[in-house]
Amino acid sequence: MSGLVSSGDRELPIGIFDSGVGGLTVARAVLDQLPHESVHYVGDTAHAPYGPKPIAEVRRLALDVLDRLVESGVKMLVIACNSASAAMLRDARERYDVPVVEVIQPAVRRAVRATRNGRVGVIGTRATISSRAYEDAFAAAPHLALTTAACPAFVEFVERGVTSGPELLTAAREYLAPAIAADVDTLVLGCTHYPLLMAVLRSVVGDDVTLVSSAEETAFDVYRELAARELLRPDDLPQPRHRFTSTGDARAFRLLAQRFLGPQLGPQLVDVDETGPLYLGAL
């Protein structure tokens, strides 16, 4: 579809998509590493969570949002959702004329570098784990032993604002038991919500296990891709502005967005739509 970018489009924003608010961890990393870039983030909160949904439905929902995000004018797409990446990454790269970056391969590369004993764990939503996308990505490193586990309640905990407490700890111990039994020394957080659970995850797996979040590694890929295509926004332009939108309850999204993004990104820098549900056609 239309949307071909050239070096003349350097002022366009980076489009970041997630099923909800978890991808804001990726947006935060992109803003930290590329402070001169503008970002347009869309969370499909009207249809979240994607994790329990069939792959075909995730594909349809994600491409619907991405179509409109591209049409709004972006120079790159970042699929900041493991479930969506697993469902339709190839479709997106064939469908759009803008570069597409996702979250699975960057995390896998980091885990391959980090492991010392060759045993790696991956936790994610049901959709991500059942897609076997991580098994496919780790196929290039056949010497590694991989243990995967679905953690369906984690996203719900995060979106309720629960990042500690006995109920979450009990769930974490249950979900992580297979990885601990397999003696993994590296654990991939295969969902962008999970970095907000770092404390409880660390308490369960112990200090000797490396926790790999895709957010920082994905931001590195964004930089490399923009630099290679000469699409980096010039440093001498006015301060960038960012737009964060949702397809569902905008006020609830704003509250969670502030938590994910942190107080450094105040209202003078960030436009979070809160005039009611922002439906897809309004992008």
Image: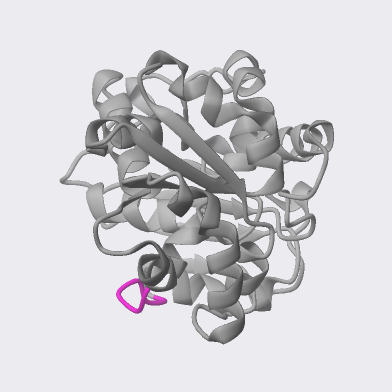
Specify whether residue 263 is painted magenta: yes
Q: Is residue 190 visible?
A: no
Q: For the N terminus, which image quadrant? A: top right
Q: Nearer the viewer, residue 123 or 254?
A: 123
Reply above or below: 40 against 134.
below
Residue 247: image quadrant is bottom right
Residue 29, given in percent of the width and then of the height, sits at 33, 53
Residue 159 image position (x, y, % from top left): 62, 71
Look at the picture and state if 150 lies above or below 142.
below
| Residue 121 image-quadrant placement | top left
Looking at the image, is 169 positioned above or below residue 59? below
Against 143, residue 40 (above or below) is below
In front of the other: 50 or 164: 164
Residue placed at 39% from the left, 19% from the top? 6
Relative to residue 220, is residue 58 drawn left or right? right
Instruction: Based on the picture, tell me whether residue 10 belongs to the magenta stretch.
Output: no
**Colouring:** one colour
Q: Is residue 61 left or right of residue 17?
A: right
The magenta segment is 262-267
